[in-house]
Image (cartoon, helix red, strand yellow):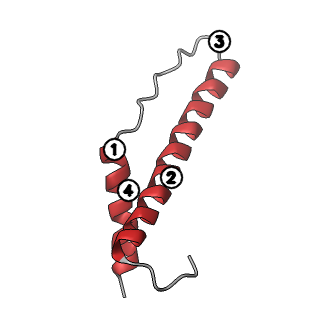
Amino acid sequence: MGDSNKSGYQLRADMLGMAQGIIHESGNRLESNEHFLAENDKKYHRKPIAPYTTEDIIAEAEKLYAFVQKK
């Protein structure tokens, strides 16, 4: 992110990409934790992991964009 001449559209597109990565990685961690718990406790029943939505990504991107706008 060394390019300080990005347009608002480019910046928002970058924030969406970062947000998708954050949300995706969070889901991966939840899934890994469920597998770990199930492997270590035979009585444990894995919980389903809800897929992320567009709204989840936009909400996360808005948090990132709010941070960028702070002075």
Q: Return the disc, 1 or 3, that comes first in the chain's sequence.
A: 3
Quarter of image, res 34: top right
Label 2, secondary structure: give it. Answer: helix
- Whole-angstrom CA distance, mark 2 to mark 3, is 30 Å
* In this view, 54 is above or below 59: above
Q: How many marks?
A: 4
Query: How busy is the neighbourhood of tag 1: few (under 14 within 10 Å), some, or many (20 plus)?
Result: few
Task: Quickly name the residue at label 1.
Answer: 54
Q: Earlier in the sequence, mark 2 or mark 3?
A: 2
**Residue flagged by tag 2: what amino acid is it?**
Ile
Quadrant for residue 2, please give it.
bottom right
Q: CA distance from mark 1 to mark 2?
A: 13 Å
Q: Which residue is mark 3?
A: 42
Q: Position of residue 4 (x, y in %)?
A: 49, 85
Q: What secondary structure is marked by label 1?
A: helix
User: Residue 22 shows which numbered tag?
Assistant: 2
Mark toward the start of the polypeptide (4 vs 2) = 2
Q: Residue at the location (47% across, 22% down)?
A: 47
Of the numbered discs 4 and 1, the one sitting upstream in the chain is 1
- Residue at position x 59%, y 11% in the image: 43
Query: Which residue in the structure is indicated by mark 4?
Result: 60
Question: Is 23 above or below relative to 39?
Answer: below
Task: Give the alpha-carbon distance from disc 4 to disc 1, as whole Å.
Answer: 10 Å
SS of the residue under disc 3: loop
In contact (CB < 8 Å): disc 4 and disc 2: yes
Name the mark nearer the viewer: 1 or 2.
1
Identify the image quadrant of the C terminus. bottom left
Locate residue 39, reporting x and y percent: 69, 19
Residue drawn at 49 percent across, 59 percent down: 18
Of badges 3 and 4, the one in the foreground is 4
- Tag 3: residue type? Lys
